[in-house]
Amino acid sequence: MKHFTVLGAGIVGVCSALALQREGWSVTLIDRDAPGQGCSFGNAGILHSGGVLPFARPGIVGMVPRMLFDRESALVLNWRYLGSLAPWFARFLWASRPSHVERASRALAPLALGARAAYEPLLREAGAQDLLRPRGELYAYRTREGFEAERADMNARRALGLPVEELDQAALRALEPAIAPDYRFAWYQPASASIANPGRLVQRLVALFAERGGEFRNLDVRSVSPTSILTDRGSLAVENLVICAGAHSRAFAAALGCNAPLQTWRGYHIMVPRDSVPLNGLLVDGDMHFAVTPMEDGIRVAGLVEFASLEAPPNYDRADLFLKLGRMLLPDFPREAQSRWMGHRPGMPDSVPVIGRSPAYPNVYFNFGHGTLGLTFGPITGGLLAEVAADRRGALDPAPYDPARYAA
Ligand SMILES: Cc1cc2nc3c(=O)[nH]c(=O)nc-3n(C[C@H](O)[C@H](O)[C@H](O)COP(=O)(O)OP(=O)(O)OC[C@H]3O[C@@H](n4cnc5c(N)ncnc54)[C@H](O)[C@@H]3O)c2cc1C
């Protein structure tokens, strides 16, 4: 029986490990923390069925000048990193050209459109159906300008078969009566859903993996080679190795034949008590680009893309901004947060994750770079990784995600 070592127990690593097990292989899953404590812990919990568009597209690129000066922008850049980030931004700008956006959308569409269906059996098997909140994504706007700015993207989603509804103020208030009265326009994507505790989801999936004979090991990996990994507790031989270390994958991939231009897109959340705001479901402020999600253990406000480094300390002033924004959206929103968090999204310039076999080593695989959509994409990209490892062609064409595009 083949053996696989999967590095990284976030949503992508555990979904990959479960899919490899389904092929009949034995799997060891490694993480330096408890499972699901990385980026997969603190996300907004949204299964974005509309996540068919890459982050780099003309509208977002238009925000770049503002992010340098406006500390309340949804995109912020720490000036200190401008020099080191310049080559990555050049790729990001290149990826925003219409032909590249179209190509990236073709790659992202099957990952997003099938997300909810891919989760249903997984949640059932893990006994975690209680975590799925079926209400779709509700995007609310104060300004007609902001609402209309999304129309082209919403039409692009419709063209891919995704239902998108346009709501007036009465319909918006019927769904969320506590919303501030100056929010007058809304888009609704009923096919999306949310997960009420993304960290617990990963823990449940790792428990399922263990029930099926998988081994989880708490190890800090220092370096990797195609035949072994060096950890804080010595060296470990590997037969097949899969890198799923999220935003931390870049150096590991580079050592294994793939120079993927991965960059951390830092994001923040705050938690406030569940009963402090009357909220019926997932609500996104479309003007200010942040999400408010009812979770098991409170209400989470999450968002912001901050360009800095993996090592830079969190700037929790950015998270505290959500208190002010929260009160703008929901007037009863509390003045203090229960907790604050910062995490590293694994961002690729074109938003297309790197999935498949190393161009240099046939026993090495990658599954990382899921950017703003790793929770959504995890079950499908895990399945794709296992198909590639089994040399079997499934419904999804692996070519757009092939690590060979970044061959060292
Ligand atoms: C604020 C915010 C909101 C978001 N909202 C959403 C959303 O609503 N929907 C959505 O789909 N996505 C969302 N995302 C994105 C999503 O969270 C990520 O894409 C996803 O979590 C990436 O999963 P991953 O498994 O690749 O990485 P991670 O969850 O970061 O897992 C990588 C794992 O590798 C481990 N690791 C790294 N280096 C080592 C090492 N040297 N040794 C051992 N272990 C190591 C880490 O400890 C970690 O557990 C959001 C992200 C942020 C920041």
Image: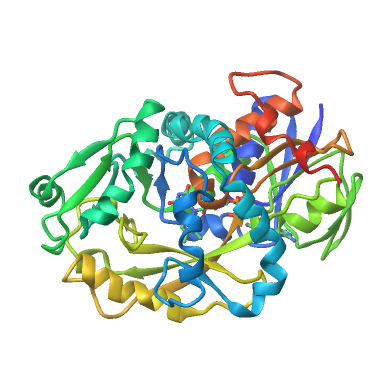
Ligand 1 shown in quarter = bottom right
Figure quadrant of residue 90: bottom right
Question: Along the horizontal axis of the image, is 380 left or right of 272?
Answer: right
Which residue occupies the foreground of this view, 354 or 134? Answer: 354
Q: Does residue 388 show up?
A: yes
Position of residue 358 measured from the top left corner of the image (x, y, whole percent): 82, 38
- The N terminus lies in which quarter of the figure? top right
Question: Along the horizontal axis of the image, is 256 left or right of 366?
Answer: right
Position of residue 176 measured from the top left corner of the image (x, y, whole percent): 15, 53
Residue at position x 72%, y 61% in the image: 87
Q: Does residue 200 show up?
A: no
Residue at position x 73%, y 38% in the image: 27
Residue at position x 36%, y 76% in the image: 321
Figure quadrant of residue 297: bottom left
Residue at position x 81%, y 46% in the image: 258
Q: How many marks?
A: 0
